[in-house]
Amino acid sequence: MAIQFTLNEKPQSVDVNPNMPLLWVLRDTLGMTGTKFGCGMALCGACTVHINGAATRSCVTPVSSVAGKRVTTIEGLSPDRSHPVQQAWMEIDVPQCGYCQSGQIMSAAALLAKTPSPSDAQIDDALSGNICRCGTYLRIRQAIHRAAELHTARAKAGEASALSQARSSPVAKTAVAGGAR
Amino acid sequence: MKRSLSRMDRRNFLKTSAAGAAGLWIGFQLRAPLASFAAEDAGATPLALNAWVHVGADDWVTIYIDKSEMGQSILTGLTMIAAEELDCDWKKVRTEFAPADKAYVNPWFGVQGTGASSATRTSWDPLRKAGASARMMLIGAAAQKWGVDKSGCRAENSVVTHAASGRRASYGSLAQAAAKLPIPTDAPLKDPKLYRIVGKSTKRLDTPLKVNGSAQYGIDVRQPGMLYAVVSRCPVFGGKVASFDAAKAQAVPGVKRVVQISSGIAVVADNTWTAMEGRRALEVKWDEGPNAGATSAGISKLFAERAAQPGYVARKEGDAEAALGKAATKVEAVYEVPFLAHATMEPQNCTAHVRADRCDVWAPTQAQTGAQSTAAEAAGLRPEVVSIHTTFLGGGFGRRFETDFVRDAVEVSKAMGAPVKVTWSREDDIQHDYYRTASYARFTAGLDADGWPVVWMNRIACPSIMARFGPLQNNFDPRSVEICDTVPYDIPNILVDYQLADAGIPIGFWRSVGASQNGFFLESFADEVATAGKKDPYELRRRLLAKSPRHRAVLDTAAQKAGWGSPLPAGHFRGIATVTSYFGYVAQVVEISLDRDKRDLKVHRVVCALDCGRAVNPSSLEAQAQSSIVYGLSAALRGAITIDRGRVQQSNFNNYPVMRIHEMPAVEVHIMPSELPPTGAGEFTVPPIAPALCNAIFAATGRRVRRLPIQPEDLA
């Protein structure tokens, strides 16, 4: 029987085994590969998505449990890398291999939505479930502080909260290009 | 206008190479056969000047990256080097991953691949020359067009200008004419004083792809009609399938087939999770083979027995045995480390499509030509018809120099007659790695009456990585004694020898390889020598490095920046270590606090001074040092793969824990200014972190940590 939920602000219906983890529905059934498989046991955070705004490990979340809920993935965080966390990530040049970064970014975005100006300790609490084998932790912390600044500045400028308004977008098919220097 | 070599048909690629794309490209010395990317770019008028540089009619410059991007920022670094000499507009530079081809063979190991911190070092000259030649041809084309002398033209920011007449032409508009010019063999390289890209901290070109989920890793590959597979492997190394019953696995809805391949039993399904469910239901009886009784304790005992006997002499200075008899003080110690898994964030995987006359492989590989030969062998095809499409790598650390995951995918695809992606679970990844070897070290030092070392004897007993690739001479593997044989200290009598001890566990290249464990051995024992001679650990090293100015400079810098010798808060302690490996020099000072009652250790700060020649991208260098420190700390604090009944006892991040953000110390990286050619940055800052940490623990407890990972009793 089809399971219905909202994926990146669009209605989504999937007809799969209800026990199938959301991670594999996203990756294999829907072809949205931005959300990563790392451990399958909610130990590494690479598969983090938002379910009704809360950072959730999709590798242990049966797809049946998201019926009727709002799911946001890295692809839906912003249509154009404009989310303050993505902006800060580019400014600080956080990623190395990048594989864990979707999960790190989703955890960071969920943190900032609740705690707009987190301390180092709050960052550590919220991100300690996300492993990075490349060791980008210092830049992650720095980028979250920067994202908080960007978010605050935007809020002051009267923009609607970009943190709570995840919009949907297709996966960008962008060649690796310069210009970000 | 996305162009992707990864979509390119290998046969077309070869055909267009042979046809030469009629004057639209010009080869570069021996790399000529590769200069055919042009033909693929329908519509544009391109100029592929060589294996690495292509100029499009649209002014976009494409740099072909023949190295694997696994986080080390090689994609950006190599592009910076070529763009510097090409004098092109950085905002109009893009990259593509190159295919497997002889033109890209890494001179350091004779195959195309990325490892041993060799990518920047071995690309520095070829990529500068590639950029400079392309630039010279573009200038030549402009001079010809305008009927002026080349000497009056200059190139900058993708535009050639002629100052006397004020004429200008973009690179793209000159590309086709440039292609018709003779190939320069003497293109002058820039004076480094004029560098505007190399040496400046530059944002990574791949960051935008890595913040929105669009970067494509091996595990993200999708092909039309693709099936998904997982493989059940014998838990004991060297074991084989005795028999299997596929019925229950095949009964899982969505499972397509169960097939035996060389590494085990593959379950093929219409998605990854279903394949995993099928594997759970699969019944396999294993013939566990000769390693079924192996244990870590047994391996440790074997090492100790071997280390009791003299081995192959790797280094001999003076007469260590005789001098030891005359030494005023003798210091002895035994050190040991366990096996370690790589645990790349992206589990191993590969997608293959075997057809009757060709094979395509999409892989997160560090070894393109190795992947190509493995795939060819498994498919029963010639390597020439195997296309390797390199994706982004979700971590490498040496694990992806292996091609076991490629063989899996090719064998399953061949059996299924369809494209197949094989995905390893985290458990597969941790239990079927080519591990950093366990190793065992014996040391004896002799000190003179003033407490200075005059004898240094060191024996290593461990398995050999290189024995995997062919018979060893004299049972000696230089990788096993890496950096032990080149102990940098000026001591008159040195004897380093090696005892081969095969443990029956697959081992391979793990970030900094032999130096990862030998750095711990060497630099911990150097501290013991300092203590025995009542010397300050920094001063001892400093004196013994008097003849090695580059090495001494990093040591001095780390000590000064860390405030070595200055008072610390109560309960805080420092340790120091310094290593040279992979042509780089590094010293680290670690500051810890330790609550001995609670066995509670906290790493507060790491000061790292490094010298790996010219810094191409200082920002990436800083990131690599941070990364190596985290990788080394994870190993020192927790890393252990242990063996019982021939099996790995760890399986996932719960029992193979790694560092997390809340444990992250402050890291200060100091890059020594250098005009020397760049060497590699991915590994050489790993080895000193474990000994610097353990030396700090000694400062706190007076207790020497001689076995990793650090145990609670080490902190008492």
Image: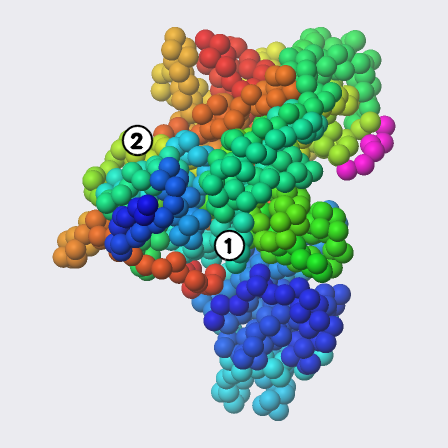
- Residue placed furthest toward the right: B474
Q: Is B566 on the left or on the right of B544, as rendered?
A: left
Q: Choose mark 2 or mark 1, whichever is in front.
A: 1
Q: Is residue B189 above or below residue B107?
A: below
Residue A97 belongs to magenta span: no
Give the percent coordinates (x, y) of residue B88: 52, 70
Residue B149: percent from the left, percent from the top?
63, 86
The picture places residue B217, in percent across and down from the top left corner, at 51, 50
Rendered residue at 59%/20% (across/down)? B642
User: Does residue A31 sit above or below B262 in this rendering?
Assistant: below
Amino acid at dot 1: Arg
Can the viewer see residue B699? no
| Left or right: residue B450 compared with residue B208 | right
For the residues labelled 2 and 1, the Cα–Cα distance comes to 35 Å
Taking depth in this image into account, of A18 and B328 the one nearest to the observer is A18
Tell whether position B471 is magenta: yes
| Tag of residue A135 | none
Secondary structure at badge 1 equals: loop
Q: Which residue is mark 2?
A: A125
Q: Position of residue B150 (x, y in %)?
A: 63, 82
Q: Residue at x 67, y 57 (%)?
A: B355
Q: Which residue is mark 1?
A: B222
Q: Is residue B509 above or below residue A13?
A: above
Chain for numbered disc 1: B
Q: Which region of the structure is painted magenta? A: B469-474
